[in-house]
Amino acid sequence: MTYGFIKTACVSPELKVADCEFNAAQIISSANEAAKKGAQIIVFPELSITGYTCGDLFFQNALQQSALEQLEKIASKIKTTKALIFVGLPFARTEGIYNCAAAIYGGKILALIPKTFLPNYSEFYERRQFTPFSSKQKTQFVRIGNQENIPFGTDILIQDKSEKSLCVACELCEDLWVPLPPSTRHVLAGATIIVNLSAGNEIIGKAEYRRNLVKSHSARSICAYLYANAGKDESTQDMVFSGHSMISENGSLLAESDLFSNQTVYAQVDVERLANERRHTTSFAASVDNFDLQADYTTVEIDLVNTAAAKTSSSKIEKLERYVDPHPFVPSDKEKRTQRCLEVITLQAQGLAKRLRHINCQSAVIGLSGGLDSTLALLITCRAFDLTGISRKKITAITMPCFGTTNRTYTNACSLAKQCGVSLKEIRIEAAVRQHMKDIGQDENTHDVTYENCQARERTQVLMDYANKTNGIVIGTGDLSELALGWCTYNGDHMSMYGVNSSIPKTLVRYLVEWFATDSEDAKNEKFSKVLKDILDTPVSPELLPPKDGKISQVTEDLVGPYELHDFFLYYVLRFGFAPSKIFFLAQQAGFSYSKAEILKWLKTFYRRFFSQQFKRSCMPDGAKVGTVNLSPRGDWRMPSDAQASLWLKDLDKLN
């Protein structure tokens, strides 16, 4: 596996009902084709050797025997594929016939997994031909042909010898549709991939229900779910089958077949991501402790990863066949993005509104620069004041021009305050900053960090003291991306009484402001919309250095790197804890326009800044969490301020 990825496939091949020889040939051909395309786990439908719709023919010895013979043939013919393959067949014993999945690898039958829950309602009559296998029954051992001691039971795990997180278990069709599927036990026993051999017929609305079932179960179980469904060649005497197959990973649908297509679907599953998510979700471990597994599991080990690596000249995947979103915080679909923006804005506003009500506060102060972050903070504050029934005039937007302020940002700040209906106050801080620099012996012509921070801290002092004067609170404007990079002045713009943007990454800030400009009720005001659109077109800058020819001279992304890259890095560092080398690999797959060298450069910058700037996050103000990634020291991220980045940077140094 490359960084935990393994390619999987669900196949619905051509089929002739009760013609085991024909069906076996189709399975062999399809398995070989899927393996050539890199699939290492390949799943076929329920009763795929015989066909699901054989009815009372399942009682015929001829069909039972042919199915076993063809199973052995399949195992022999696909031996060289070095893929783990699941096929379905009836397996007759003295007490009854079992509807089974057979796991095959390296020319051997690894296990037989019988179906637990047999549907016997509406159009289904499986109890007529088949015997259910109770989860309370222990795993037994059977013989097929010359192969002895084949595990037969439901509680069987197939695990890779070297990659222990690659662990596969199996259930069949109806097993998924019950309140407590066998796969629930399997994932608690360690399975990260569940395969389901199914023969679900198609009726109106069932495809959508099935899709939701697969997605939700994979999410609840934190697993990959491979669902291979019987196709259109099954008998249509009483039902129609569509071959609706799916591969889902932790609630996300990675691949889905078209209905009635006899289509093979492929997806690369990230087993490492699943394992990390389980470790992060501590309630998963608690479920393992509190759930009685009822039976001892039989573990069958295979050498899937090392064997696959040995087959090829390189064990590394050069290009992923799954989508890697370059902007994980921002939905690419416009309709979904619009809905997400409204949800985020509502969460931000409700968080601030609660704080205002709790402290019985009737006024707020915001430093309005004409940039994106302070614009969003003002818009959210207006919404919060509307929710609490307080006049917007109680919001004081203070613009504080200094050495780096441009006419464009100054004009936009003033115009925005006017269009929002808030109180605007201009307090020029040049004289105060010059006096302060004189007091501390700072040369005004030396444009260093002291020169910049003197301005940031003077602005914060003005805001804090004016908030005291008006019995209000200072609304913080800094965003999540700035907190991650430490791109804020300690005890300057770093500080406030409530940070409404503290959980909002920079890539999302832009779309939230755009939502106000195009989709909000206020967007009907052309002047309001116009000023927001100009703010959106303004380069991101702290404006702490003098402008050149009246234009912004200090562009943030030229200094710390592209925010779209940093937000991408931040997502995978915090959300999944991936190694730097894997994040670098994913960034290359995401379709960015940056070269490998540029991505590596800015990723190193991210780690250096992320580790060195934790002290700023350790005392950050309150602010509501709105997404899955947050840096609050009271909730989501607790990290020592003295931690070293060397381990992470060494991982990246290997890539040079």
Image: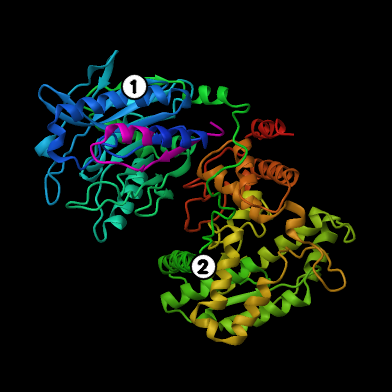
Q: Is residue 463 above or below residue 178?
A: below
Q: Position of residue 242 (x, y in %)?
A: 31, 52
Q: Is residue 257 visible in this depiction of the protein?
A: yes
Q: Is residue 16 above or below residue 427?
A: above
In the displayed structure, does residue 645 sit left or right of residue 198? right
Q: For residue 607, what is the image quadrant?
A: top right
Q: Is residue 468 visible in this depiction of the protein?
A: no
Q: Residue at x 41, y 47 (%)?
A: 263
Asked whether 458 or 567 is in front, the reply is: 567
Q: Secondary structure at mark 2?
A: helix
Range drawn in magenta:
1-27
In the displayed structure, does residue 472 sit left or right of residue 89? right
The quadrant of the image that shows the C terminus is top right
Asked whether 120 or 63 is in front, the reply is: 63
Q: Position of residue 370 (x, y in %)?
A: 68, 73
Q: CA distance from mark 2 to mark 1?
A: 47 Å
Q: Is residue 6 above or below residue 423?
A: above
The crowd level at tag 1 (other Cα within 10 Å; few <14, some 14-19, many 20+) is many
Q: Which residue is mark 1?
A: 110
Q: Secondary structure at mark 1?
A: strand
Mark 2 or 1 closer to N-term?
1
Which numbered dot is residue 334?
Answer: 2
Q: Position of residue 538 (x, y in %)?
A: 71, 70
Q: Position of residue 219 (x, y in %)?
A: 37, 46
Asked whether 52 or 99 is in front, the reply is: 52
In the displayed structure, does residue 515 sit left or right of residue 453? left
Asked whether 312 or 434 is in front, the reply is: 312
